[in-house]
Amino acid sequence: MSTETTPAWLRCYRCWSQDLEVQVHYEGIHKIDPDTGERADVVDELQEAVVQCLECMHDQPHLGFLDGRVQPVEDRWERMIAGTPWVASVTVTVDAEEVETCSGPEAGDALSYAAFGDHGTREFFTHVRFHKHEEDKIVVHLLVELYARSLDEATDVLETAARGFLTITSLAEESRPPAATGDERH
Ligand SMILES: [Zn+2]
């Protein structure tokens, strides 16, 4: 297969490697065909898939798995493939009831989710530095790494993802991790 026809999105967003793997978890309830005993119409189904890069081992939130093939997440892949990493120091103030738990091993994920929703747990690298209770609010202090093509875009992505009042203390561009060897020109 020629790399000329390889879609731009079908690669790791961090190291651009094309050595990818998908883990699919499928749960389905199907009717049984009374004549053949075959699995027939779907009553209910749930499929979860995670694409991972075998070069750098990172998950690929710009890729989904649908109809038996990996597909790009439309409003995300260009930004992540063409972008560079940005690191932000932020606080997000959310209603305390939005936070499932703020102590124990699940606290980091719960606070990241309360602050940035799915972006916080799936796309961004988030590190919760600490959190403060203020009456019925929780102020979550985080370091966030995300991919974007410009300062404006990085700001916009943070603002769109935030589920509470967002304050950006600092936002700086980092250098992209080195590209995986041998995947660019053949
Ligand atoms: Zn990679």
Image (spheres, rainbow, N blue to C red):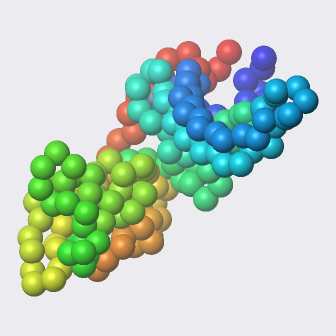
Residue at 17% of width from left, 80% of height from top?
137
Which quadrant, please, contains the N terminus?
top right
Judge whether 160 appears above or below 108 on screen. below
Question: Which residue ends up furthest to the bottom in the rendered image?
Answer: 135
User: Residue 138: x percent and y percent?
Assistant: 16, 74
User: Residue 97: x percent and y percent?
Assistant: 24, 75
Q: Quadrant of residue 25?
A: top right
Residue 10 in view of the camera: yes
Residue at 85% of width from left, 34% of height from top?
33
* Left or right of 114 in this view: 23: right
Judge whether 151 appears above or below 136 on screen. above
Residue 9 in view of the camera: no
Judge whether 56 appears above or below 80 on screen. above
Q: Name the foreground residue: 174 vs 146.
A: 146
Residue at 20% of width from left, 75% of height from top?
96
Which quadrant, please, contains the C terminus?
top right
User: Residue 159: x percent and y percent?
Assistant: 39, 73
Q: Name the foreground residue: 169 vs 102.
A: 102
